[in-house]
Image: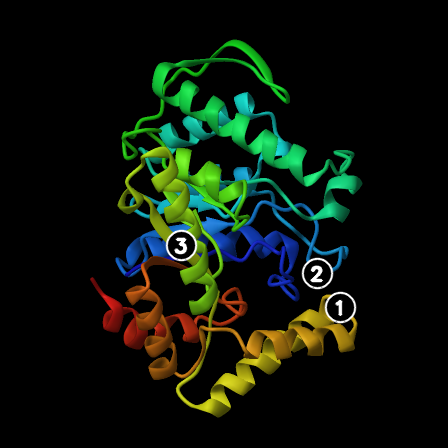
């Protein structure tokens, strides 16, 4: 199994209590930490502008700015976002940004892309909130533009949502990691009629439901779409995101859950909502002692989940959970 990790950037109130002028140091130190440890194949950020689950006056650092900065301070680890909202930036512009960061990083960009969902954020930034059909239509056309720009150097498309005529992309991406796209495309989301159909056509990787039952079901839907268009299902890496709360004992796990709840409250989330989030978090697949997490992930690995992207809510404040995961979980799942 391969592993990536989200770098705290504030979106989930994970930088609360740290002075703004220290944020970059914290984030860059964690990126360098991942870069130095071969356990981690990739470092990730979220593409959001306001905190979740409630928009609060706390820092949320912008994803592609961070991608460029991480590219300049790391040498090995791959860099992605899970996932960029297609409609937040024109796809021609985004393809150009990604190609530039690919050059800065020496060919380490991963393109996570989706239709977008955070309605409050959309409306606050003046994007409106198109129907799901329109958002997914933009996703489909946008990934076609990416592919053209990264593989031929230009894109032309007279679509319903995007009209481009000879948009150039030079320099071309440095990497040729993806045979079809050059920069690997991760289509994120589990929508069965549209999103997974787009993934079957364009994706190198997918990212969807990380529960065992949900993962198996979405995988079957994806396989059916691949069969319908004649694509080899095995060509697509299937991944999922996991909120990791790990402790050597059940008490340590409970203490870490309490720390995360307290962080949410300090960030301005109402106590009742923070408590509900803690309860939800406690029931997730990658919460528990190392043995419990290993057993869960082994079942998922057997179901075809070969790439786990992890998130440690306390990482900006305490790396002991990451260290425990590196010592006792990752080696037990090594390919």
Instruction: Decide if residue 227 is in sight here.
Output: yes
Q: Say above or below: 32 vs 326.
A: above
Pointers 1 and 2 in contact (CB under 8 A)? yes
Residue 302 is drawn in which quadrant? bottom left
Q: Position of residue 159 (x, y in %)?
A: 58, 18
Q: Say above or below: 249 vs 225.
A: below
Quarter of the image with the N terminus in it:
bottom left
Instruction: Say which mark, if any, is on residue 269.
Output: 1
- Residue named by callout 3: 219
Q: Position of residue 266 (x, y in %)?
A: 72, 71
Extreme-front residue of the structure: 228
Secondary-structure class at tag 2: loop
- Residue neighbourhood size for the residue with mark 3, other residues' Cα within 10 Å, grouped as few (<14), some (14–19), many (≥20): many
Pointers 3 and 1 in contact (CB under 8 A)? no
Secondary-structure class at tag 3: helix
Q: Position of residue 316 (x, y in %)?
A: 52, 64
Q: Earlier in the sequence, mark 1 or mark 2?
A: 2
Please state which of residues 116 and 134 is positioned toward the viewer in this rendering: 134
Instruction: Say which mark, if any, is on residue 53.
Output: 2
Pointers 2 and 3 in contact (CB under 8 A)? no
Q: Say above or below: 79 vs 160.
A: below
């Amino acid at each position: 199994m391969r592993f990536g990790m989200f770098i705290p950037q504030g979106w989930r109130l994970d930088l609360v209590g740290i002075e703004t002028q220290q944020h970059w140091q914290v984030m860059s130190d964690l990126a360098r930490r991942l870069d130095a440890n071969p356990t981690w194949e990739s470092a990730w950020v979220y593409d959001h502008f306001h905190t979740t689950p409630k928009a609060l006056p706390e820092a949320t650092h912008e994803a592609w700015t961070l991608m460029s900065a991480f590219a300049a301070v790391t040498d090995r680890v791959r860099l992605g976002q899970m996932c960029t909202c297609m409609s937040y930036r024109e796809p021609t512009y985004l393809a150009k940004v990604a190609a530039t960061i690919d050059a800065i990083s020496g060919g380490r960009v991963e393109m996570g892309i989706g239709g977008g969902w955070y309605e409050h954020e959309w409306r606050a930034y003046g994007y409106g909130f198109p129907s799901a059909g329109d958002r997914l239509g933009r996703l489909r056309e946008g990934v076609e533009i990416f592919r053209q720009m990264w593989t031929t150097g230009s894109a032309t498309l007279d679509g319903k949502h995007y009209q481009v005529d000879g948009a150039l992309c030079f320099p071309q991406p440095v990497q040729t990691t993806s045979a079809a796209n050059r920069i690997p495309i991760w289509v994120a989301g589990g929508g069965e009629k549209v999103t997974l159909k787009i993934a079957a056509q364009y994706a190198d990787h997918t990212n969807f439901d990380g529960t065992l039952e949900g993962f198996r079901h979405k995988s079957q839907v994806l396989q059916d779409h691949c069969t319908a268009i004649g694509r080899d299902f095995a060509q697509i890496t299937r991944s999922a995101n996991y909120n990791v709360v790990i402790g050597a004992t059940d008490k340590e796990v409970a203490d870490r859950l309490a720390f995360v709840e307290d962080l949410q409250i300090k960030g301005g989330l109402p106590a009742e909502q923070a408590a509900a989030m803690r309860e939800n978090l406690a029931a997730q697949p990658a919460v528990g002692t190392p043995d419990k997490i290993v057993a869960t992930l082994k079942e998922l690995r057997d179901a075809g989940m070969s790439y786990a992207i992890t998130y440690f809510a306390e990482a900006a404040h305490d790396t002991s959970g990451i260290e425990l995961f590196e010592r006792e979980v990752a080696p037990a799942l090594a390919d």
